[in-house]
Amino acid sequence: MTALLAALSLVLAMIPPGIDLIPRGEEEESTRPVSIEERLEQRLADLAEAPSEQAGEAIAEEVRSLWRQSGGATAQLLLDRAERALAENDRDTAERQYAHLRRLEPEFAEGWFASAQLAIARGQWDFALDALTETVSLEPRRFDAYALLGRALERASEPRAALAAYEEALRVHPWHAQARQARARLEDQLAGRAL
């Protein structure tokens, strides 16, 4: 054993100064787990540079999943219960689950977004507008919330504000099909008014 340690010391002594056997940062990078927020940052950057609508939508699906995972276990449980209720066409139960989620985790943008989607399905546009505004204030990169916000603003006869919301959605997700179509339609509509 002593001979092995002596031989190892001799080999290490022969390595010229300044040469690392393990490149700096490489070991730390490979063993350190990536947080949801770090992964989200990377995928949102990828989304902004997506080469096609198909690639963009695949990345957008992952981004939506990461947003959903960013809440705690309680948030996940309440989201799952609400989705089961919606699958059974029980909107009242889903609405209670979302309300409970908003009370327990008011900083969780996904809870506000899901509440807004249900409100729109129920024709509750005023609440939807408030919930979407809260969503984008908590998570300014929520392209899906901006697209729905644009729809709610159109419903409120605010075409310029709606256009701004669609443009914000496209800033984050340039291939968002609904936002692209709505932006083109509103641009034509507003150009017609200007004439």
Image (cartoon, rainbow, N blue to C red):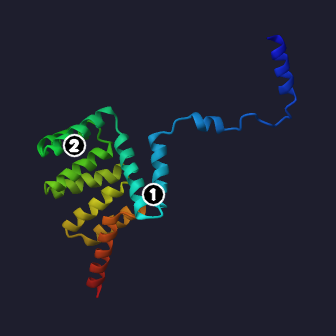
- Going from N to C along the chain, the mark reached first, 2 or 1, is 1
Q: State the residue in front, 115 or 5.
A: 5
- Report, in whole angstroms, how far the alpha carbon at label 2 lies from the one at label 1: 26 Å
Q: Residue at 87% across / 23% down in the picture?
A: 10
Q: Residues within 10 Å of mark 1 (few under 14, many from 20)?
A: many
Q: Position of residue 62 (x, y in %)?
A: 40, 49
Q: Mark 2: which amino acid?
A: Glu
Q: Position of residue 51 (x, y in %)?
A: 48, 64
Up the image or down, 175 lies above or below 139; here it is: below
Q: Quadrant of the N terminus?
A: top right
Residue 177, by quadrant, is bottom left
Q: Residue at 30% across / 65% down in the picture?
A: 178
Mark 2 falls on what kind of element? helix
Up the image or down, 169 lies above or below 188; here it is: above
Looking at this rendering, what residue extends furthest in the bottom direction?
195
Q: Quadrant of the C terminus?
A: bottom left
Q: Is residue 65 left or right of residue 92?
A: right
Q: Position of residue 29 (x, y in %)?
A: 60, 38
Q: Residues within 10 Å of mark 2 (few under 14, many from 20)?
A: some
Q: State the residue in front, 23 or 190.
A: 23
Q: State the residue in front, 76 or 99.
A: 76
Q: Residue at 27% across / 59% down in the picture?
A: 148
Q: Residue at 45% across / 57% down in the picture?
A: 47
Q: Mark 1: which amino acid?
A: Leu
Name the residue carrying label 2: 83
Name the residue carrying label 1: 47
